[in-house]
Image (cartoon, rainbow, N blue to C red):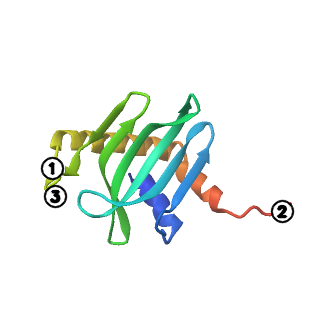
Amino acid sequence: MRTVALILMEAGILPPGFHFHIENPPWMALDIEDIETRGPFGFRAVSVAHYGRQNGDPMRDPEMLFEMELRGGIYRLSPWYWRNDYLGIEQHSRYRDDEGNLLVLACLHRRLEQFAGLWDNSLRSQGFVEAFRRSRKPNLPN
């Protein structure tokens, strides 16, 4: 998710609980937020999601959770969770059991990485980095 990583780098210092809501018509808004927990490997976890509405309820379409690791001054995002409320699907490719053992579903993890790559291409081509930059500029009076 290079596009999301670039947005996070441009945001600067990321305080606990940060949340970015990026409007970018005609596309669905993008939400990037610190869920204030750790992923399976112990790194800070972030949610990346599009939300729709059904009967007034927010619906993830989709949401992915990533562990966020700062390496060489660049954020590396590694997925482990995917959810789509419209389809009623929730998947974990890595998790810890009750004893703290790390369980990895390698085939599912590869699919999540592939999906994240496709989604990243869409977010980049849809101009979400530029939309984030526009949202950060102060509104100047005419």
Please provide percent x and percent y for residue 28.
Answer: 56, 38
What residue would you read off at disc 2? 141
Identify the residue shown where x is 32% and y is 37%. 90
**Residue 99 figure quarter:** bottom left
Check disc 3 and report the residue beneath it: 100
Residue at x 26%, y 64% (from the top left corner): 42
Rounded to the nearest whole Å, what is the CA distance between mark 3 and mark 1?
A: 9 Å
Pointer 3 local density, CA inside 10 Å: few below 14, some 14–19, many at least 20: few
Nearer to the camera, 90 or 131: 90
**Position of residue 70 in the picture relative to residue 86 (left or right):** left
Query: Which residue, given by chain and number where applicable, does mark 1 sit on?
Result: 103
Q: Secondary structure at mark 1?
A: strand
Q: Quadrant of the C terminus?
A: bottom right
Answer yes or no: do the residues labelled 3 and 2 have beta carbons within 8 Å?
no
Which circle marks residue 125 in the picture? none
Q: Residues within 10 Å of mark 1 (few under 14, many from 20)?
A: few
Residue 81 image position (x, y, % from top left): 31, 45
Q: Are marks 3 and 1 in contact (CB under 8 Å)?
A: no
